[in-house]
Each structure stands twice: as structure tokens, then as C-alpha cells.
Amino acid sequence: MTENKELICINCPMGCRLNVTIEDGRVTEVTGNTCPRGREYALKEAVDPMRILTSTVRIEGAVHRVLPVISDGEIPLRQMFEAMAEIKKIDVRAPIKEGDIVLHDILGSGVNIIASRTMDRVD
Ligand code: SF4
């Protein structure tokens, strides 16, 4: 089965419009890219897009009730809902420092979920 997709390359401000041909789940042709980075982007984005995940988790003992978190790498977009469900199960306690890992190796991806800000303990 042959499928065509249009993508916008997000690797630089030129925003080249890419045309991608996919045959049996494999990219067979990329056109519209001005440089090789566009082709690399299309190869990944067209068949298994990856994203940085941002969310919040509950925190106890801090001035705020939720702590913003971010993944320290990209995870497959297809696993995003499952990853969000895992993050919803987390409770952390202040103090937390920016960069502290709040969840190791989410869904066996090798990617950690880390605090994206510091929150001190308040009594
Ligand atoms: S294909 Fe190259 S020039 Fe075009 S947007 Fe992507 S990185 Fe920029």
C-alpha cells in the first residue's frame, strides 16, 4: 500500500514543505527538503513520530499543589496516552530540585521524567 504525507520540517526557520511517500510502512521517497536534515526528520516523523512530554504531578509539602515535569528525551507519540497515565499515578514530596528524576525509564523507553522547576518545602 502506498501513502503520501505532507510534513513541515521543524528543524529550522525555513520550514520546508516535505512530501513523503510511504510504501508498506517504509519511507521510500522524500522531496521538498532543502538539506539532509529534512530527510532525516521525514524518515522518523512519517512512520513513528517522537515528542518531548510535558505535564504536572501532584506534590505535597510545597507552596503549589502540582509540580511541572518534562521528559529528558523524546518518547513515541503513539505511547503518549499511556505515559500520561503513568505520570498521573505519581505523588512527590517537597523539596524537589529542578532536574530531579520523578519517574525512571518511563514505559521502558530509557527516558526519565524530571522536575522542570525547584519547589522548596513549606511547613
Ligand atoms: S529541510 Fe533543512 S532547510 Fe528545510 S526546514 Fe528542514 S532543516 Fe531547514
Image (cartoon, helix red, strand yellow):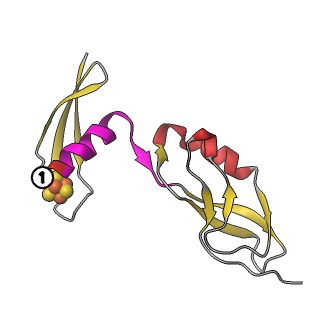
Q: Which image quarter is the C terminus in?
A: bottom right
The quarter of the rendered structure image containing the N terminus is top left
Q: Is residue 112 magenta?
A: no
Residue visible at 31% across and 23% down in the picture: 25
Could you say which is closer to the camera, residue 117 or residue 8?
A: 117
Q: Is residue 119 left or right of residue 8?
A: right
Q: In x, y percent, where is residue 95?
A: 78, 76
Image quadrant of residue 3?
A: top left
Percent x, y for residue 109?
55, 42
- For image coordinates 68% across by 75% down, the residue present is 97
Q: In the rendered structure, which amino acid carries the disc numbered 1? A: Cys
Q: Is residue 82 above or below residue 55?
A: above
Q: Residue at x 61, y 39 (%)?
A: 108
- Residue 40, compared with residue 3, is above or below; it is below
Hey, which residue is sitting farthest right in the picture? Answer: 123
The location of residue 116, given as percent across then percent down, is 59, 70
Q: Which residue is mark 1?
A: 35
Q: Quadrant of ligand 1?
A: bottom left
Residue lying farthest to the bottom in this orientation: 123
Residue density around tag 1, few if under 14, some if 14–19, many if 20 or more, within 10 Å: few
Q: Which secondary structure is most common in the magenta stretch?
A: helix
How many numbered marks, from 0 up? 1
Asked whether residue 55 is in view, the answer is: yes
- Classify mark 1 as within 8 Å of ligand 1 or not, answering yes or no: yes
On the image, the x and y values in percent for residue 91 come to: 79, 59
Q: Which residues are magenta?
A: 37-52
